[in-house]
Amino acid sequence: MSRSFDPIKFEVIRSAPEETVEFVNLRLTAIGSINKPKLEKAKREGSGKTTGKKGVRKVYFSESGGFIDCPIYERLGLPEKAGIEGPAIIEGGNATTVLHPGHTAETDHWGNIIITREV
């Protein structure tokens, strides 16, 4: 590869062919097919009944007029189809989900939290 680049290198930057070539950026685009990964369902205990409650904490919500007692849930403790009405806080290892008043949350069988707003 270096030999085919030497004439261009000399022409463009006036560098001698015997000087070392260093690739700083190299881009490759490839097209192929792969097998679709099989997602495993989250391992959850129970179904539909909300568990995983860790406690209660004062949390500020402007739509509630200030600080209110807010239930705190552990995300990994929530079973599939756990229904939670806001206001609530759902804490996980890498994220905290704030569920505002007037919103509800439900967990699916992959552990996602689906939030909907009451109309």
Image (tube, helix red, strand yellow):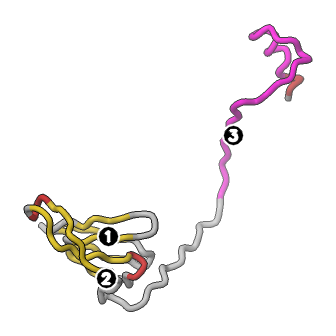
Q: Which amino acid does the dot numbered 2 rest on?
A: Lys
Viewer-nearest residue: 26 or 24: 24
Residue plotted at (14% across, 70% down): 68
| Kind of element beneath mark 2 | strand
- From the image, which quarter does the C terminus lie in? bottom left
Q: Residue furthest left?
A: 65
x and y, in percent, of residue 43 in the image: 49, 84
x and y, in percent, of residue 98 in the image: 27, 65
Compared to residue 48, the image places residue 113 above or below, namely above
In this rendering, the label closer to the viewer, 1 or 2: 2
Q: Earlier in the sequence, mark 2 or mark 3?
A: 3
Q: Which amino acid does the dot numbered 1 rest on?
A: Ile
| Dot 1 crowding, Cα within 10 Å, few <14, some 14–19, many 20+ | few
User: Which residue bears the numbered disc 3?
Assistant: 28
In this rendering, the label closer to the viewer, 1 or 3: 1
Relative to 59, 110 lies left or right? right
In this rendering, the label closer to the viewer, 2 or 3: 2
Q: Earlier in the sequence, mark 1 or mark 3?
A: 3
Residue 18 part of the magenta segment: yes
Q: Quadrant of residue 83?
A: bottom left
x and y, in percent, of residue 17 in the image: 89, 15
